[in-house]
Image (tube, grey):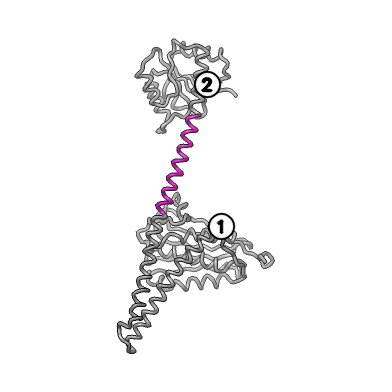
Amino acid sequence: MALHLVIVNDNPADRAMLRRMINSSDLDVVLVEIGTARELAQLPLEEFNCILLDHRLPDSDGIDAVVQACKNQQYPPCPVIVMSNHGDENTAARAFKAGANDYLIKDTLTPTRLSGTIGNAIDKWHSEKELRCSWESQRDALRVAERANLAKTQFIANLSHQLRVPLTAILGFSQLIQDAELGDDKQAWAKYKTYARDINQSAQHVFDLMSGIIMLAQLESGAAAVSYTTFDPRETLFGTVALFEKQVYSAGLEIRIDDQQALQTVCTDQHVLQTIMSNLLSNAINFTPAGNAVSIQLSDLDGSRCLFAVSDTGVGMNPGELDYLTKPFERYHGNAMFRDSGVGIGLPLVSSLVKSIGGDINFLTAPGDGLTATVIIPIMNLADTPI
């Protein structure tokens, strides 16, 4: 395969000398000859195999032209050999600092030396590129690992807070009841009954939190089982929405449901679908400012799939950050209206649950436009249900 070389030199005699040497060597080349730095800047240099660059050009210093050719990158887009009429250590040092792969003195050139230098420069450039790519991959992997480690550290801190608050209530109220510190009359026991309700609610919060963590761990390890049943997805949806009535009311929100095109029967795991609906609805409520609405859509997609979508009217987020939504323990705090301090397993859990029943999930968002989470799951017939 022919090498594509660029000669950058404004002297016709120098260009002719280089052309003769290259043509008399064993190299198979296609030559492009130019005379200015401006012409060099206009070439797609990444498409060439090597540049033979004179260090003095009529419109620029040749080494400065190398820097310009890098286009804010640390390294040139292809191998560069800087050429000079006489040896100069300072010029050579500047050339190598700018990313050149070699430095040649014109008076010492021979066809053999020139072809050897070109071959070595190309090999050196590719070797250094592989090393850079390897280093960058390792650096990126390290950053991912550091972020994951930080996320887990934050998860542990958030989890301890999430557990400490309800457990403190459980311990405190149960101790009051056990010791009958308010007395043993009818009025005191009425208060104890209220405390027992608070204990129950706090225990339920801890139970739900730990259930989510255990379920996520089971899904990631492949130990979770899917139980298929036939049911009306609308009943599941309205039952899920009812669980959030107090939260929606206290947040000053409105829930809008579009189920006009919903199927009456699906065959999938009802508990999994309810958990998906619950987590997405909870997330939308937490990110929607007071006075706004959360929109829900449940519909038949194409006769074989069911679509469930939840949209909030929050501040949205940068689409480039969407990947972090489904990573365990990662949390997004871009919305000042965010009302939850959970541990960061809701959306990762949803993503894993959707996959467990053969579905897909995607997110649509932009800064200022809120976020829409769309889940598409297959509609299975009884004949398809695992025995």
* Farthest-out residue, left: 182
Mark sitting earlier along the chain (1/2): 2
* Farthest-out residue, bottom: 186
Residue 274, position in %: x, y?
52, 68
Q: Which quarter of the figure has residue 155?
A: bottom left
Q: Is residue 44 visible?
A: no
Q: Nearer the viewer, residue 31 or 111?
A: 111
**What secondary structure characterizes most of the magenta part?**
helix
Residue 132, position in %: x, y?
46, 34
Front: mark 1 or 2:
2
Q: Quadrant of the C terminus?
A: bottom right
Image position of 280 (left or right of 64): right
Q: Residue at x 51, y 24 (%)?
A: 122
Q: Which quarter of the figure has residue 262?
A: bottom right
Q: Residues within 10 Å of mark 1 (few under 14, many from 20)?
A: some
Q: CA distance from mark 1 to mark 2?
A: 51 Å
* Farthest-out residue, front: 179
**What is the number of the mark on residue 119?**
2
Image position of 194 (left or right of 128): left
Q: Quadrant of the N terminus?
A: top right
Q: Nearer the viewer, residue 79 or 47?
A: 79
**What is the number of the mark on residue 114?**
none
> In the rendered structure, which amino acid carries the disc numbered 1?
Asp
**What is the number of the mark on residue 360?**
1
The magenta stretch spans which residues? 127-151
> In the rendered structure, which amino acid carries the disc numbered 2?
Gly
Q: Is residue 169 visible?
A: yes
* Relative to 14, residue 354 above or below: below
Q: Is residue 145 magenta?
A: yes
Q: Is residue 313 magenta?
A: no
- Element at label 2: helix
Residue 296, position in %: x, y?
49, 65
